[in-house]
Image: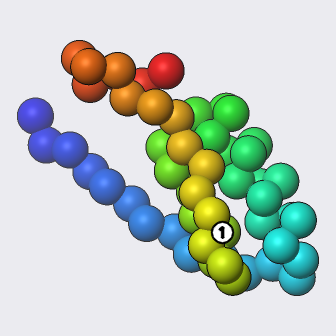
Amino acid sequence: MVEEFVQVSTTVERREDGARIAGALVEERLAACVQVVGPISSTYRWVSGNGSWY
């Protein structure tokens, strides 16, 4: 099985907009990890011991 990984970068006017987008993407499981830079913060789902996403 071939796994694909995609990285997407974008900009928004305010940090709060980035945080809102990050939360929505992770909550909807459209992204495993989202980083908001300036200073950096990460939003992600934890992986269980068997490699499954919560």
Using the rendered view, name the quadrant where residue 35 is placed: bottom right
The residue shown at (48%, 43%) is 32
SS class, disc 1 = strand
Q: Which residue does the numbered mark 1 point to in the structure image?
A: 36
Q: Position of residue 11 (x, y in %)?
A: 72, 81
Amino acid type of disc 1? Val
The residue shown at (23%, 17%) is 50
Q: Where is residue 52 in the image (x, y as percent from the top left)?
A: 34, 21
Q: Mark 1 packing: few (<14 Cα in 10 Å), some, or many (20+)?
A: some
Using the rendered view, name the quadrant where residue 44 is placed: top right
The residue shown at (49%, 21%) is 54
Q: Where is residue 43 in the image (x, y as percent from the top left)?
A: 61, 49
Report whether 16 appears left or right of 43: right
The residue shown at (81%, 78%) is 12
Report whether 42 appears left or right of 1: right
Residue 8 seen in this snapshot = yes
| Relative height, residue 3 to residue 37 (above, below) | above
Q: How many marks are shown on the rendered structure?
A: 1
Quadrant of the drawing holding the N terminus: top left
Residue 31 seen in this snapshot = no
Report whether 43 appears left or right of 2: right
Q: Position of residue 7 (x, y in %)?
A: 43, 66
Q: Which colour scheme is used?
A: rainbow
